[in-house]
Image (cartoon, coloured by chain):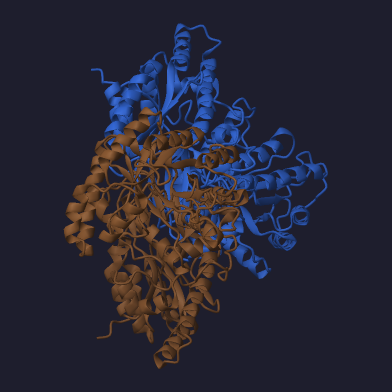
Chain colours: A brown, B blue
């Protein structure tokens, strides 16, 4: 969606809180990119209106911008604005970047001239000014893109004259600019003066101030100098005395920046704040907390599914996903990226097109370096070590596991103590969701979709057990089902070789495990359990374990050999099982745990 | 489904009660046919395994059998067995009848020779014996049809030798007969002797006894004589003394026939009873009551949707219907009979193909003769007369209205008093359903679909109000929605000219108003409200009113003119409105009534 549309929507209710956005730059290393994705994803939970990704002209880094825009839009489902500069750029490169943004569903471009060559040489490239780039975008894509332009309230280093800069800005608006993002600022008076002048000069598009949170005193001073912006006295007075204590600077800086933001918002010119995050989280969140903007749930951009919808137009009709990749969105999107059609509420013929290979380049089975993986998860040498890891993960002490990319969610709170108990009994749990019966769709933890509806879940648990125990497990499940006189528990079990067992009626049976009923609509059923995708997931799961053992290698330490042997035994001697409890009304969240607790008594 | 499959399914559980079926003959008049459809539909609620329709060789009546098989299978969704005789029949006629049965999804044929010509002349036709017809069916359709054959336990009028008859029966089995339906009987000993002989002779297919309930003493004696069957002494002893009192004969006859059935079932040869209903309901039901078979809900053949699924293979994927035709299944099936694709849980592109014309031949807007219509509904000369009719209908005092073919169901009990109240206030209600929240799918009144699930409904009310009141109605609806801060009430309103108003988001919005969540499955959402089909229904509704006025004509009585004028004013000055209450959880079944009660105060 266009940023201007989102701004308008958000501002329709004059009592709604201000909106904000985050700008990130392209990191220098692959691991840095992975980490930034995780951070973006996490920061998106703060509910920014959009995120920006800066442009890196030339070579690999230029491609990295388009690559990242693709991932944030397609995989992470974040409203993204791509920066694009035109100096020293071939027309072909510009068009490739725009085409790529277009294809992945990105609708926002910040059109920039770019810095002058550092060596003082002449500008090269087909376009000299941002306004030329804007005209090109308009002529090539019509109104598809919402175009942002840069504003310089205190003048540009190459052109200090504020009025001239306003003339240039007006030209950019006239060429097709839809909104303005300004240079960073700390002096509100200068800024508001400039806003007034802009309006007088006929600049009518929204002005979005660039906010730079303060992390260290040195950085604060250095950046202001670099950008040639004015630092108000009270900033210096309050920060200088504490300049050697970074945490105090951050604390006081957050207050100062928040005060500044409040004045900007009170001026009436400003409704939205754009944060230069420098890829950091903390100082930005501190400012938002002071402003009271992070705890308020806003409706704008609310998810329509329990998983975040991809903004890629190819996936626009996707309305169903298998539960197995709940914590692995990167590999799910990658493996299904070539699908012509996505399953939907009817599922039908497009239910399970072939899942792409798990060996695909670009997808990492484990999204961490060897060093990070070892520091996170160590060398598990037995079932207890690995269930202890899961206990840590469930308790929030570590943020990921080899098979779970994202931090444990509060969604599982209703069954957390049972999950911890199971792992302490030696059952390695892999994925789960609690039963939910008629929870308002606006609920902060379990809700999703439009407001004023009700959402539901069937309890789901996926786990590894020794293959030798599978028969007893099936017996216990059958006993519960016989007592209930129907298949209240449905299970699928499969080992690495593909030995498969299930009590589901037929291979094509699809069990909806998450659904929602909304005003004026049909019932949405976005999460399912079924055989074909479970088999694909099994392949991925055991490949993750294999990949994990490969991270132990090149090291002759005994412990590492033991860990390899143990994880190999998980691959060869364990079976991956999932169970759905179909009764979400009576005694939910009990039957599956009872079955497993009976099979795995707690050893004192 | 094949009768033999259904028998096998039903008998898998040895403790399950016996099953039964009903045989009907083709009536002589069109009105008789309409009435019989209603009776079949009603008697199907008793849960017979299937129904039979007899064959009438020659002319219009032969076509009537295939026509009726088509309607019972396609419109009424009843498992049907078509009788087919072969004497005096051209091959072309036989093939036409079989093709027609095949096309409409009928899978059961009772293959009969047919009676000898009454004038004593030779048999004509291409096949002389039932076994020839069976071989023909097998060669032409392979195993598509399940073929029944006739058995004569006490000999055939043309061949009294029981053993010879058993030889013939064995030949019919060998030719491909799948089950036996016998001549009517009252003498259990003779019958069981015959069963034994059949089994000894290698006849292994199921034997189904023909049961003829006793309605009058004369009929009982006459039929037995005609079929040359033996009447046991105790039948005569108990019936002869009361022979002049029909109701006592029926009562005692039901006991006698039920005792006979019990002995048959105890013999072990018999698991299923086939009733020759003579198109009558009462005596048959009395026997079933004595046997304790009518109150037991059987799972076999249970409906998978809240409306009875059509057995026509073209409609096999149909899984969604608009609510508007809830009480008008004949016209709904007819108007959608040419659809290539039916809407399903996803709705999608096939959501609302064009509804066929309401002028189509064969479909009667009002399914009654003028005389019947007048006796049922009289001459409504004002709104009170017509709401009084609706009150009678809602109270069960009359079984149909011009726009409702079927008797009011217990489903509406939760809102019946409110509906009565609305009509007394002058709001003519047309169609409705109460809100249902999480009702077990096995519930006898509200349940549907597989067992152990939960079903849900949003409250729906359709009614006529004076067009002049529409604005106030919309204001009241808006007031409720404003207070709720969302569209808790969604409405559509349209008058005969097509003036349309709604607060639904877009024309393509589809509101699921009935859905069910079942073990191991997706959520089924078989009943919807949406714009396009509502407009089609509006055309039909006002055409029904117009048709009704045409029944008043050819009569110069003042009252009749007044009724015509009044119904014309309903057409010209009223608007058809439907409202859905989207909140099925909090204070269900209140908001819609409150809106209308406010607008239509009760006059004392």
The location of residue A559, given as percent across then percent down, is: 39, 90
Taking A493 as reference, is A152 above or below it? above
The residue nearer to you, when weighing B25 against A528, is A528
The location of residue A132, given as percent across then percent down, is: 55, 40
Q: The C terminus of chain A lies in which quarter of the figure?
A: bottom left
The location of residue A513, given as percent across then percent down, is: 42, 59
The residue nearer to you, when weighing A307 against B426, is A307
Asked whether residue B267 is in view, the answer is no
**Is A293 placed left or right of B138 in the picture?**
left
The location of residue B430, given as percent across then percent down, is: 42, 28
Instruction: Identify the residue shown where x is 47% and y is 30%.
Output: B404
Taking A277 as reference, is A427 above or below it? below
**Seen from this angle, which residue lies furthest front?**
A120
Instruction: Identify the residue shown where x is 51% and y is 60%.
Output: A61
Q: How many numbered callouts? A: 0
The residue nearer to you, when weighing B165 against B398, is B398
Asked whether residue A131 is in view, the answer is yes
**Is B245 placed left or right of A101 in the picture?**
left
The residue nearer to you, when weighing A80 against B19, is A80
Quadrant position of residue B201: bottom right
Quadrant position of residue A586: bottom left
């Amino acid at each position: 969606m266009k940023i201007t549309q989102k701004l308008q929507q958000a501002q329709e209710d004059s009592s709604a809180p201000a909106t904000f956005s985050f700008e990130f730059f392209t990191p220098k290393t692959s691991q840095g990119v992975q980490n930034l994705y995780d951070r973006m994803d996490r920061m998106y939970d703060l509910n920014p209106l959009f995120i920006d990704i800066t442009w890196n002209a030339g070579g690999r880094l230029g491609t990295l911008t388009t690559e990242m825009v693709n991932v944030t839009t397609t995989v992470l489902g974040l409203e993204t604005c791509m920066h694009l500069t035109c100096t020293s750029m071939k027309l072909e490169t510009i068009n490739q970047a725009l085409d790529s943004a277009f294809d992945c569903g990105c609708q926002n471009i910040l059109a920039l001239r770019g810095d002058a060559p550092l060596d003082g040489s002449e500008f090269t490239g087909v376009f000299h000014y941002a306004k030329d780039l804007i005209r090109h975008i308009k002529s090539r894509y019509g109104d598809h893109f919402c175009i942002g332009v840069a504003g310089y309230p205190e003048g540009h280093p190459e052109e200090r004259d504020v009025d001239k800069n306003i003339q240039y800005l007006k030209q950019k608006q006239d060429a097709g600019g839809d909104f303005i993002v300004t240079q960073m600022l700390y002096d509100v008076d200068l800024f508001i003066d400039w806003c007034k002048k802009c309006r007088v000069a006929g600049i009518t598009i929204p002005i979005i101030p660039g906010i730079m949170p303060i992390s260290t005193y040195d950085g604060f001073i250095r950046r202001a100098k670099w950008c040639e912006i004015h630092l108000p006295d009270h900033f210096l007075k309050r920060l200088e005395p504490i300049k050697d204590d970074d945490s105090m600077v951050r604390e006081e800086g957050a207050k100062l920046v928040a005060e500044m933001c409040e004045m900007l918002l009170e001026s009436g010119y400003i409704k939205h704040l754009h944060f230069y995050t420098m890829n950091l989280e903390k100082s930005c969140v501190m400012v938002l907390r002071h402003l009271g903007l992070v705890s308020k749930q806003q409706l704008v951009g609310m998810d329509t599914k329990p998983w975040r919808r991809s903004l890629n137009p190819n996936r626009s009709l996707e309305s169903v996903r298998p539960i197995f990749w709940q914590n692995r969105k990167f590999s799910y999107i990658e493996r299904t990226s070539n699908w012509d059609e996505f399953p939907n509420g009817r599922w039908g013929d497009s239910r399970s097109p072939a899942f792409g290979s798990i060996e695909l380049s670009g997808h990492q089975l484990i999204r961490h370096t060897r060093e990070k993986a070892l520091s996170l998860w160590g060398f598990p040498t037995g079932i207890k070590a690995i269930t202890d890891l899961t206990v840590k993960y469930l308790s929030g002490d570590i943020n990921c596991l080899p098979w779970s990319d994202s931090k444990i969610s509060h969604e599982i709170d209703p069954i957390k103590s049972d999950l911890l108990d199971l792992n302490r009994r030696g059952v390695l749990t892999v994925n789960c969701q609690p039963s939910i019966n008629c929870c308002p769709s606006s609920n902060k933890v379990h809700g999703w979709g439009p407001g004023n509806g009700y959402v539901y879940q069937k309890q789901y648990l996926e786990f590894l057990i020794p293959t030798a125990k599978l028969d007893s497990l099936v017996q216990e499940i059958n006993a519960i089902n016989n007592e209930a006189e129907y298949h209240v528990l449905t299970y699928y079990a499969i080992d690495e070789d593909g030995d498969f067992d299930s009590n589901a009626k037929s291979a094509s049976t699809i069990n909806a495990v998450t659904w929602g009923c909304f005003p004026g609509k049909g019932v949405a059923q976005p999460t399912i359990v079924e055989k074909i995708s479970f088999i694909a997931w099994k392949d991925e799961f055991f490949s993750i374990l294999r990949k994990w053992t490969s991270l132990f290698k090149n090291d002759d330490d005994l412990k590492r050999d033991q860990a390899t042997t143990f994880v190999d035994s998980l691959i060869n001697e364990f079976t991956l099982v999932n169970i759905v409890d179909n009764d979400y009304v009576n005694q939910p969240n009990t039957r599956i745990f009872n079955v497993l607790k009976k099979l795995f008594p707690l050893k004192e």
